[in-house]
Amino acid sequence: MVHAFTIQPASYNTFEDETEQLEQCKEWGLLSEKAAKTKAFFYKGNGLNLPCGIVGFVDKMTAVIEFDNKQLHCIHPSYLKEMQAANYSQRGAGSADSTEAEVLELETLQEDAPAIVEANVEASTEELEVKKVPKEPKKEKAKKEKAPKLQLPEEKVKMIATVKEFTTVPNNFSDTEDEVIIYEAVSMIEPEMEIGEAWSSHSATLKKLELEVGDKLSFECKIVAKKLSKHPVPYKINNPAKMQKVTS
């Protein structure tokens, strides 16, 4: 049976092993901190009650689940957590999923908006130049050269970084804000590559390290191009592991 309601991910990060899956599910609140293994989850939206498994994530606010028919679906972890309650209301499930689709579409539009606006402004400017001087050939507009995007590896890499700042960012799905860490002097060890600044969630696992501003760290992680809300930090550190403080 094909599920028509699914929001298929264009791309997503799969869990490398059960340990990474457990850590992410604990961070989302889907499993308790004492959990030693994952459990069965159920999708109860659209009047259904379907078993599913959490197979990965698009980003911090978008989990990817897989149904028995191998279809994938993007869902916010908070919705999935609500669905696990025995008294979950089917009456509100359909509207929750509609909200998910609208939010995902809105986030995509928000991420693409700067490029769309820039393209429209350039097109309008060129059109005005043609109208003002119709008999002269249009001069190519000098464009500011942008720094080339880093070719980030898809697999986990060894990195070093220094804690720059602890802060919070808004969470559209919760009354509380998400705690994050901003790092500076971020670079890969293998392969060697300078990153600059990056950020990660300040998870319960990281809090156990009692980090402070100025701490230099070594760790393994996946790094992706994802800007931090309201901060000019372009890269995100996903699921850091084997994190250790480095003493000079």
Image (cartoon, helix red, strand yellow):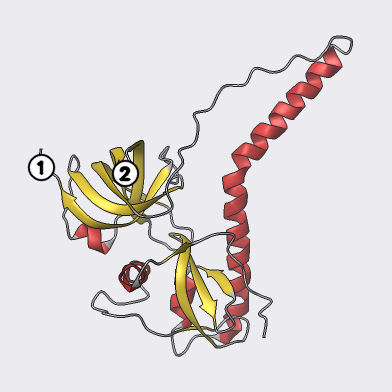
Q: Residues within 10 Å of mark 2 (few under 14, many from 20)?
A: many
For discs 2 and 1, the disc positioned in front in the rendered view: 1
Residue depicted at 57% across the width and 78% down the height: 70
Please state the horizontal and vertical placement of residue 134, each as a whole percent of the image.
88, 13
As drawn, is 184 to the left or to the right of 117?
Answer: left
Above-or-below relation of 68 to 163: below
Q: Hey, which quadrant is residue 19 in on the image? A: bottom left
Figure quadrant of the C terminus: top left
Q: Which amino acid lies under the numbered mark 2 shown in the image of this protein? A: Ile
Residue depicted at 79% across the width and 17% down the height: 129
**Label at residue 25:** none
| Mark 1 secondary-structure assignment | loop
As drawn, is 51 to the left or to the right of 101?
Answer: left
Tag 2 and tag 1, C-beta contact below 8 Å: no
Residue corresponding to mark 1:
247
Residue corresponding to mark 2:
182
Note whether residue 8 is visible. Answer: yes
| Mark 2 secondary-structure assignment | strand
Please state the horizontal and vertical placement of residue 235, each as a whole percent of the image.
41, 44
Q: Which amino acid lies under the numbered mark 1 shown in the image of this protein? A: Thr
Q: Hey, which quadrant is residue 150 in on the image? A: top left
Please state the horizontal and vertical placement of residue 220, each as a whole percent of the image.
28, 53
Residue at far top of view: 136
Residue depicted at 16% across the width and 54% down the height: 210
Above-or-below relation of 184 to 60: above
Above-or-below relation of 45 to 58: below
Please state the horizontal and vertical placement of residue 121, each as a whole percent of the image.
70, 29
Nearer-N-terminus badge (2/1): 2
Note whether residue 96 is visible. Answer: no
Figure quadrant of the N terminus: bottom right
Q: CA distance from mark 2 to mark 1?
A: 19 Å
